[in-house]
Amino acid sequence: MYLRVLFSVLITFFIFSCAAKQPVPTAEILYKEALEAAKSKDYQTSIESYKKVKELFPDHPLAQLAQLEIAENYFNSEQYDEAIIAYEEFIKLYPGNINIPYAVFKEALCYFNQISEADRDQSATRKAIEKFEKVIKDFPDTPYAVKAYNYLKFSRKRLAEQEIFIANFYLKSGKYKAAERRYLHVLKFFPDIEIQERALLGLYNLYKTTGEVTKAEEIRNTLEFFFPYILFNENT
């Protein structure tokens, strides 16, 4: 019995001795571990290591980068909702950081990567537009503003496509006034988007259907002048 107790004490002492000899992790060590995990696409392990940097060394310069890298890992693993939260936390906690324009741009990309087809809900599209416009407005002299402009144009086109989709549905359903409002909305609010001919063609078909000959001819003349490649369906 005495030997068993003595053996247990010795084992316990040995374990604690080994633990005491292990080096205390530094911010640099944890950050490097996180980087290596990310390179191996072990994103969850990387995130946990970056979180330790923040928790154990909140005042260390690497803590700011750790928060940004947490967002990057979520983004790279296509966990966009989590990435948005992480980017927003970075922007809120470190407003003076040089990487703020990049973080706002990547937050916009999180929404952009969730954009649906034209016949689906466009909530993500609207949020992407909002964020890309913020990049252009708040950080015009950064390369992200140029990139944001191209993504913004695509996002706006998707909204316009949805308007056309809904207008065409109304036209087929005989809801002519509702269809007309949608087509006119596209012409008014999306003049910079290469979708104007589809709105005009929709109006042309609508006015032909409702017997508004003068309006139909005016639209046709406009289409033939600006979009001569348009083929008209005379049976419409």
Image (cartoon, helix red, strand yellow):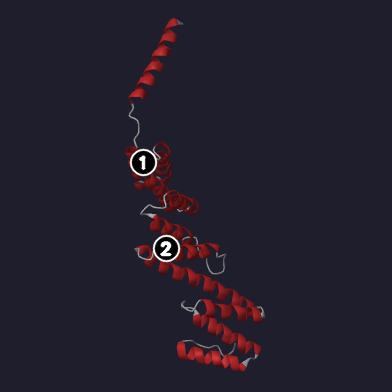
Between 65 and 165, the one lying in front of the other is 65
The residue at which mark 1 appears reads as 60
Between 121 and 88, the one lying in front of the other is 88
Q: In what quadrant of the picture does the C terminus appear?
A: bottom right
The residue at which mark 2 appears reads as 138
Left or right of 144 on screen, residue 108: right
The answer to whether any part of residue 41 appears in the image is no
Residue 71 vertical placement versus 160 (above, below): above
Within 10 Å of the Cα at label 2, are there few (<14), some (14-19), or many (20+) other Cα atoms? few
Q: Residue furthest front?
A: 96
Earlier along the polypeptide chain: callout 1 or callout 2?
A: 1
Between 27 and 222, the one lying in front of the other is 27
Residue 166 vertical placement versus 1 (above, below): below
SS class, disc 1:
loop
Left or right of 51 on screen, residue 206: right
Q: Residue at x 37, y 24 (%)?
A: 19
Residue 143 % position (x, y): 34, 64
CA distance for labels 1 and 2: 28 Å
Count numbered badges in the picture.
Answer: 2
- What's the residue type where badge 2 is placed? Asp
The answer to whether any part of residue 165 appears in the image is yes
Q: Residue furthest top?
A: 2
Residue 178 % position (x, y): 64, 78
Residue 182 % position (x, y): 59, 77
Left or right of 93 on screen, residue 201: right
- What's the residue type where badge 1 is placed? His
In the rendered image, which quarter is residue 162 located in?
Answer: bottom right
SS class, disc 2:
helix
